[in-house]
Image (cartoon, helix red, strand yellow):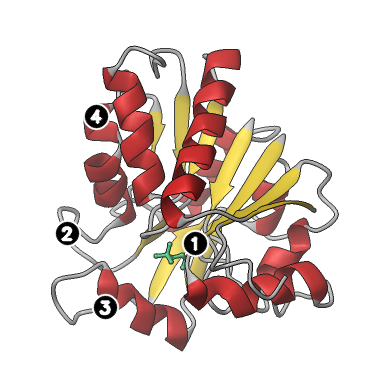
Amino acid sequence: MNIIAGGSPEAWADAVAERFIAALQARPALRVCLPTGLTPVPIYDRVAAAVAGGRISFARAEIILLDEFGGVDATDPGRCDRMLERYLLSRADLPPGRFHAFDLTRDLDEVCRQHEAVVGAGCDLALLGVGTNGHVGMNEPGSSRDSLTRRVDLAPATVTASARYFSHDRLPTWGVTMGLSTLRRSGEVWILASGPAKAAIMREVVHGPVTESVPATQFRDHPRTFLIVDEAAAVEL
Ligand code: PGA
C-alpha cells in the first residue's frame, strides 16, 4: 500500500483534489467510483471549483456510486445519491445518464447485477472513505475478499454513525454496496481519511494483519492503492 500522509485537513483536501483534477485532465473519459459521507466533502468542494474555473470537465466522465442506504425515502437528503448530488453533481457538468446510482425500488438482485455490469472489468479509479470499524463502502467486517455488489446489513456502529447524515432518527439498517472484489478490480484506489477519529483504524489498515475483520486491509496487496491521510489521521502510522 502506498502511503501519503500529513498536512492539515485543508492541505490534505487540496492535495487529494489536485490529484483528482490531474487524473481527470489526463483521462477525460475517467470511469470513477465515488463515495459519500463527510470525508470527501472538502475534496468535492475543490473539484467543483475546478469545474467552475474551467480547469476540468466531467463531459466525458462516468461516475459510479459506491453504495446506498436502504429503507429511506428516495428524496431523503441523507441518501448517498442525494449527498453526492448536493456536494458534487449539482456543480459538475456530468451529462445525464453518466451517473450510475442504485434504484432500490427495483428488484435488488437485478440492480446489483446491473451495477456489476456497469463496473465491468473495473473502474479506472475508486475513492473510498473508511469507517472506524474498517469498513469500505458498506463492506462491513466479515465481508469476503471475493464479494460483489450486493445487499448488506449494516454493523450496529455504522447504523449509529449514520445519524450524522440524517435529520431524523429512522436510521437505515441495510444498504447495497459495491463489493471488495468489485473495488479491487479498479485500476487505482485511493483510501481517504481525515481527522483524529480515524487514527486508530489507520494503524490497523497499515500495520495490522490482512483480515476480513478489517475490510480496508484487503487493499494492502493492490499495487495501485494509495492511502491518503492527513496529519491527525496519520499519528499512529
Ligand atoms: P465518513 O464515513 O466519511 O462520514 O467518516 C466514512 C465511512 O463510514 O465509510
Amino acid of disc 3? Leu
Task: Depth check: give the residue in front, 35 or 7.
Answer: 7
Q: Which residue is mark 1?
A: 194
Residue under the point 65% across and 70% down: 202
Q: Which residue is mark 4?
A: 91
The tag on residue 76 is 2
Separation (CA) of disc 4 from disc 3: 28 Å
Amino acid of disc 4? Arg
Residue under the point 73% across and 47% down: 225
Could you tell me residue 58's position as x and y percent?
40, 19
Separation (CA) of disc 2 from disc 1: 26 Å
Disc 4 residue: CB within 8 Å of ligand 1:
no
Could you tell me residue 56's position as x and y percent?
41, 16
Separation (CA) of disc 2 from disc 4: 19 Å
Q: Which residue is mark 3?
A: 171
Which comes sooner in the sequence, label 4 or label 3?
4
Mark toward the viewer: 4 or 3: 4
Residue under the point 49% across and 65% down: 151
Indicate the secondary structure of the residue bearing disc 1.
Answer: loop
